[in-house]
Amino acid sequence: MENLIIGCDHGGFNLKNKIIEHLKEKRYTVEDIGTYSTESCDYPIIAKKLAQKISDGVYNKGILVCGTGLGMSIVANKFKGVRAVTCTDTCSARMSRSHNDANVLCLGERITGEYLALDIVDIWLSSEFSGGRHQRRVDMFEN
Ligand code: RB5
């Protein structure tokens, strides 16, 4: 089973814990880089820490949770090789893997309920990149 990295700010703390619990039941190994409470903190610090590890190839995939899933993706996408997507539905989750080879999933605890969020996580993790013409387009992201 794939190793994953996950992070959150205070706005995503509860959902992050639910996701970790869910992934551990499915036998994933998950590195949790915090934050570790609902005390207010700055999401860019967490997003940068996770995105750097994706960019460096330490992990192939990561999950970031904040209030909306928006700030995390904006920050993560500044890192070379990071393709972060905010998903609020399962179709976008599947397509972000299939067409965009997304490697960071961003979720918003204040936007998406727990059951849907866990479905999004499952679908995102199990969907494969289609390659082919999509690989050519993904290759254009940074060149
Ligand atoms: C924190 O209040 C909130 O701004 C953060 O969790 C996130 O939604 C940012 O995009």
Image (cartoon, rainbow, N blue to C red):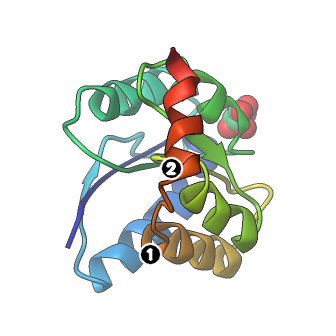
Percent coordinates x, y for residue 39 in the rendering: 54, 37
Work out whether residue 20 or residue 104 is closer to the camera in this orientation and state it: 104
Furthest residue toward right:
111
Percent coordinates x, y for residue 125 in the rendering: 44, 68
In this rendering, the answer to whether 73 lies above or below 112 is above
Residue type marked 1 = Ser
Q: Quadrant of residue 81?
A: top left
Tag 2, which secondary structure? loop
| Residue at image mark 2 | 101
Q: Nearer the viewer, mark 2 or mark 1?
A: 2
Q: Earlier in the sequence, mark 2 or mark 1?
A: 2
Which quadrant of the rendered structure holds the N terminus? bottom left
In this rendering, the answer to whether 42 lies above or below 85 is above
Residue 105 in view in this figure: no
| Residue at image mark 1 | 126
Residue type marked 2 = Asp
Q: Tell me: 57 left or right of 73.
A: left
Callout 2: few (<14), some (14-19), or many (20+) C-alpha neighbours within 10 Å? many
Disc number placed over residue 137 in the picture, else none: none
In this rendering, the answer to whether 104 lies above or below 95 is above
Q: Tell me: 139 left or right of 100.
A: left
Query: Residue at image x 37%, y 41%?
Result: 34
Callout 1: few (<14), some (14-19), or many (20+) C-alpha neighbours within 10 Å? few
Query: Residue at image x 53%, y 38%?
Result: 136
C-alpha distance separating marks 2 and 1: 12 Å
